[in-house]
Amino acid sequence: MCRSIKTLRPPVLSHEATQEDIRAAALQYVRKVSGFRAPAAHNQEVFDRAVDEIADATARLLATLEVRGAHHHPVRTPEPEPRPGVV
């Protein structure tokens, strides 16, 4: 495991992961797996495509994970105040 890839879900990450967080993790993963910090020009397109695909998969994963014990507080719309004289 690449040690520079951080856990991107609350409560480990104190905030929701940003696209920049997700892309950085994907880039680190592709660098680790490929063995290249920066690909040669003839590999740039496939390298970039791999980063994009992994970032997309990571975003989907984070969006659908259910963490036991985590409290999700849905945003609630306040009830409208009753107007005087209207029932």
Image (cartoon, rainbow, N blue to C red):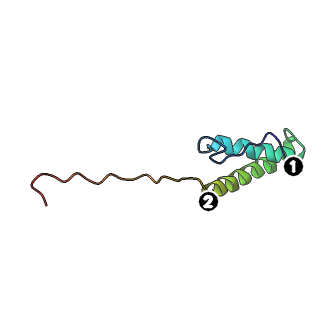
Looking at the image, which residue is at 64% across and 58% down? Answer: 65
* Number of marks drawn: 2
**Residue beneath disc 1:** 33
Query: Few, some or many C-alpha atoms within 10 Å of disc 1 (few <14, some 14-19, many ≥20)?
Result: few
Q: Residue at x 67, y 54 (%)?
A: 56
**How far across and how far down the image is residue 79, in percent?**
29, 54
Label 2 sits on a secondary structure element that is: helix
Taking 39 as reference, is 79 left or right? left
Q: In this view of the protein, which residue sits in the foreground, 19 or 66?
A: 66
Q: Earlier in the sequence, mark 1 or mark 2?
A: 1
Which residue in the protein does label 2 denote?
A: 64
Q: Residues within 10 Å of mark 2 (few under 14, many from 20)?
A: few
Q: Of the residues shown, which amino acid type is indicated by label 1?
A: Val
Vertical relation: 19 (above or below) 74 = above
Q: Tell whether 46 sits left or right of 66.
A: right
| Disc number lying in front (1 or 2) | 2
Q: Tell me if label 1 and label 2 are in contact, CB under 8 Å.
A: no
If the image is split into quadrants, where does the C terminus sit?
bottom left
Residue 4 position in % (x across, y down): 79, 39
Q: Name the kind of residue labelled 2 in the image.
A: Thr
Where, by quadrant of the figure, is residue 23 drawn?
top right
Compared with 42, 86 (above or below) is below
Question: Closer to the camera, 46 or 67?
Answer: 67
Rendering coords of residue 72 (x, y %): 52, 53
**Cα distance between the residues tagged 1 and 2:** 25 Å
Report the residue at 63% width, 44% height from top. 19
